Structures are given as structure tokens and as C-alpha cells.
Amino acid sequence: MKFDQLFIAGLDTYLPAPVSVKQAVADGRYDASEAAMTELESVLVAGDETAPDMAVRAARGAVARSGIDPASISLLLHASVYFQGLDLFPTASYIQNAALGNHSALALEVKGASSGGVTYIELAAAHLAASPDRTAALVTTADKFCEPLLDRWRCHSGLVMADGASAMVLSRQRGFARILSVGIVSDPSFESLYRNEPFQRAPIPIVLQRHNANDQAAAENEERGQFRKGLRAAVDLALQESHTELGRVAYFVFSHIGRALLEKEYYREFKIREAATTWRFGRRTGHMGAGDQIAGLSLLMDHGALNPGDRCLLIGVGAGFTWTCAVVEIQDRLPLRPSPLFT
């Protein structure tokens, strides 16, 4: 989808303290061979913070930085991957009340796995385009991956799940960056790769890598080819609709997965230089569920890595699979807010 008047007016994150990967290996929590393959340095791990409260803090920051009246925000979409602290709990309404106040914005929690945060830019844009009275929307993401149901260090080969939140204010009127296009491709034929247990009456411990080794290897070989087709199609669609050549892209913002997966799925496919990615940030955070792309863009802006006229790609891949690519063009620089996670 191509956009003529869609801006990013505000961004912010909530990033809990990092935990050293070396220490996790020394403690026996993380496999040494996995650590060598991912080349991660640290992973963000929340303490007493809840996922909804982390989202509230990111949302408040993004709204404040946008300069937009919270009362003008007509939609809040909250993207998450994991448990939000309570069952049968209206997470999006909680964030709306705490971050925007008590007014009649539509607040919804959406899924979408690891592509949720960037995918729902298009949903928010469609909502804004439906009526001239709608001028701003808010997308939030937050997750807290914790035991006893999930062991962040062992639930998925090639990456480690990380805690944290991000938020993005979208506006039809103004902002420091324009969203030129979003390309989305979906193929549900591989959803069974993540349905590795019979349906249950209640939650059970999550172990994503539980397939028979031979069956899994065959499925992954087939998945890889389809993965690249879907990824390439989403990127090509977004580039075509924004009239952007791949060589013009200043930065690529992916999910914060391990080095081996980045090399296999992204660097080789698009012939990307690592210096043009957020790897130096992602290797210190781990995979923040649906929030990596918004968080990555926020850190790039906070560190002055992007200049007016630069274009960057936000690329998300959600299990199932859904591939999403957003083309963003920077209009203005933001005040610097250096972080030790991006040095």
C-alpha cells in the first residue's frame, strides 16, 4: 500500500536492564554452542515490570515527543506475542486509559507474532484514511517472556526472547518521517511448524523446537525457500510502491535475531552490509517479540544515524507466515538521546 500523507510523529521505547549472555552460559541457562552461533552479547530481562506497564511508559514517551494532543488519537493498536500478565484482560484498554486518558479512542490488542509492530502500521493507516476527522493513531508493543511457561534461553534456536516495549505515533498531518509504503505478503501453509502439540484446555510450557528431528529438517528446508520468496515479495512490493531502489536504502531494521540467522535470511538475500543494519543494537537486546522494528528505528533516530532524505526499511516476519516491509523517509533529525545499547 502506498501512502501520500502518513507521518511518524513520535517514537519511544522502554528497555529493561540487559543480562550478559556470557553469564547466562556460565550459569548453565544458555547453551554455549547457541551463544557462539547467535553472537549475542546481552538480552533485555525485565524485573517487576509488567508488559502492559512497559507499553504505557513507551506510549507516554512517544505521545509526549510527538507534540500531538492525546485526545486527537482515535486508535490504539497493541501488538504482543506472549502473555500480558492476566488472562481475559483488556490490555489495550489499560494502555489507553493510562497513556491517553479516558476518551473514546478505539483500543485493540492484536497479534501477528514478530511482525506485529510493523504490520499494524497499515491497519492504523487504513483507519486514519477512513475519515477526515481521524488524524492520529498509536501503535504499541510489549512483551515479558518469563518462566514457568517459557524459558527465553531455550525456547527457539538461533535467537533469544527479550523483554521490552515500543511505541509509535502516526499522524496524517505532520511528523519527523514519512511512511511511503507498506508491503505485506501472507502464506499460512507453514503455520503447523508452530503447532507442535495437540490443542490444550489450558496453557502448557512452550518449547517451539519440539518436532521430530527428521521431520523438522524437511519442513525447515521447504520453509526456507518459501521464507525467501515471501520476504523478497514483501520487500519488492514496498520498494516498488515507494519508487525506491534497494541501493538507496540507508538502514535496514530487522527482528533482533542471532547473527547466523541474519546472515542466512537477510544479508545474503539482499547483499546487505552489516554497518547498514541495527545489529550492534539488536545483539545487545535480543528479540523483543513484536517490537524490534519500532525500537530499532527509535534508537537510530536517538543516535542521529539517519539524516533528512534517508530512507530505511522496517522488515518484520511473523510466524505463520506474514512478511511485512515498510519504507520510511526521514524528514527531520530528532534531539539526540544516546544509549549504551547502541555504542
Image (cartoon, rainbow, N blue to C red):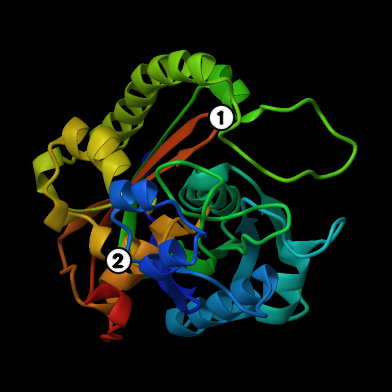
Query: Cα distance, mark 2 to mark 1?
Result: 26 Å
Of the 4 image quadrants, the one containing the N terminus is top left
Q: Amino acid at mark 1?
A: Gly
- Residue displayed at 48% across by 75% down: 15
Is 96 placed above or below 256 here? Answer: below
Tell me the mark number nearer the camera, choosing from 2 and 1: 2
**Disc 2, SS:** helix
Q: Residues within 10 Å of mark 1 (few under 14, many from 20)?
A: some
**Disc 1, SS:** loop
Visible residue check, residue 245: no
Q: Position of residue 14 (x, y in %)?
A: 50, 76
Q: Which residue is mark 1?
A: 320
Q: Position of residue 209 (x, y in %)?
A: 56, 34
Q: Residues within 10 Å of mark 2 (few under 14, many from 20)?
A: many
Q: How many circles with numbers are drawn on the protein?
A: 2
Of the 4 image quadrants, the one containing the C terminus is bottom left
Is 230 placed above or below 179 here? Answer: above
Q: Which residue is mark 2?
A: 281
- Residue displayed at 67% across by 27% down: 195
- Residue displayed at 90% across by 37% down: 201
Q: Amino acid at mark 2?
A: Phe
Q: Residue furthest right?
A: 201
Mark 2 vs mark 1: which is more N-terminal? 2
- Residue displayed at 29% across by 51% down: 36
- Nearest to the observer: residue 62 or residue 288: 288
